[in-house]
Image (cartoon, rainbow, N blue to C red):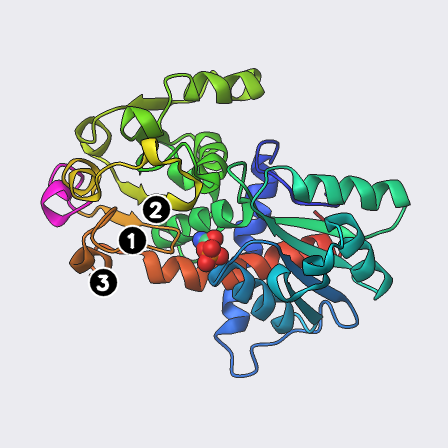
Amino acid sequence: RHHILSLADFTTAEYNAVLQTAASFQEVLSRRTKKVPTLQGQVVANLFFEPSTRTRSSFEIAAKRLSADTLNFAAATSSMTKGETILDTAKTYLAMGTDIMVIRHKEAGVPQAIAQEMDRLGVKVSVLNAGDGQHEHPSQGLLDLFTICSLIDPAQPRIELLEGKKIAIVGDILHSRVARSNIWSLTASGAEVHLAAPPTLLPKFFAEYLGATDSENLKSKRLFTHWQLEPALENADFVMTLRLQKERMTAHLLPSLREYHQLFGITRNKLKLCKPNVKVLHPGPVNRGVEISSDLMDDPEFSLIQDQVTSGVAVRMALLYFIGSGRA
Ligand code: CP
């Protein structure tokens, strides 16, 4: 695999290669030196046309731990403010010797368009999608998978460990690229995936729409949608809660935050419906007290939110390693 743009066509072997490689990089990160020479001489450019805290910083530290040189770009302080286009920006970074472009944009399809342009130019640059609009966030999906699988078996995290587990994905599904990437990986694992959201944030056609994009792959999978929270939480092993993406909503979609918290906010009390050892995930950033209660978010007995951020470094090292060494 030359680019990593989506999890829709990831194979079981690829998921397991990422999980096992991330586990070995986690071991590297526990050493005093924390570094390997794998990508020495390569340039990783973080081209973020939309704000980010954890994705941009963890790709940067991941690249540095692999001994790559890193370039960081933020649209607001770039020559795009003078009218330079996205493709011309990417070509500028290409001319500086960039080997891997990590791209985030508020519009779906921008990383794919840049990858196509690089392929058309016949250059060996790899593109990694760091979140494109409402479409996909593959590195987040993979770090979520790694966080869960390595909780079950830290020595040998593998996708098969999720077979038969019940996973609830709760919240603003409509606007969530994280939900879309997680739906691909979790349904591929054999887990039972339950989506729960108000009707405005979980259109009736959602599951059918995903099925239509890859009917052979998804129709046989166990994917359920609910407009109430309770059926999704009953006996769940893991609950993934999502941020209300107010910046992507028109006013008529934005629910009352108090009512939303009452109906779909994850609290200790609501977790009583789940398995006793249930764990809660959130990709961040969090609207505290809206999609999850503040005390639950900080409770290490239930919350994996900080573990997700930590996992992100090793998983992104694995992704950079695979495309940087041309082995994915
Ligand atoms: N989860 C995630 O993508 O966070 P950032 O927007 O901070 O990168």
Q: Position of residue 160 (x, y in %)?
A: 45, 38
Relative image position of residue 89 (x, y in whole percent): 76, 56
Residue furthest to the front: 82
Question: What amino acid is labelled 2 in the image?
Answer: Arg
Horizontal relation, residue 174 to residue 272: left or right: right
Residue drawn at x 21%, y 37% as measured from the top left: 264
Tell me the chief SS of the magenta region: loop
Q: Secondary structure at mark 2?
A: loop
The residue at 71%/56% (across/down) is 101
Q: Nearer the viewer, mark 2 or mark 3?
A: 2
Identity of the amino acid at label 1? Asn
Residue at 55 percent across and 44 percent down: it is 138
x and y, in percent, of residue 8 in the image: 58, 32
Tag 1, which secondary structure?
A: loop
Coordinates of residue 190 in the picture (x, y in percent): 42, 30
The circle on residue 287 is 1
Asked if residue 157 lies left or right of residue 324, the reply is left
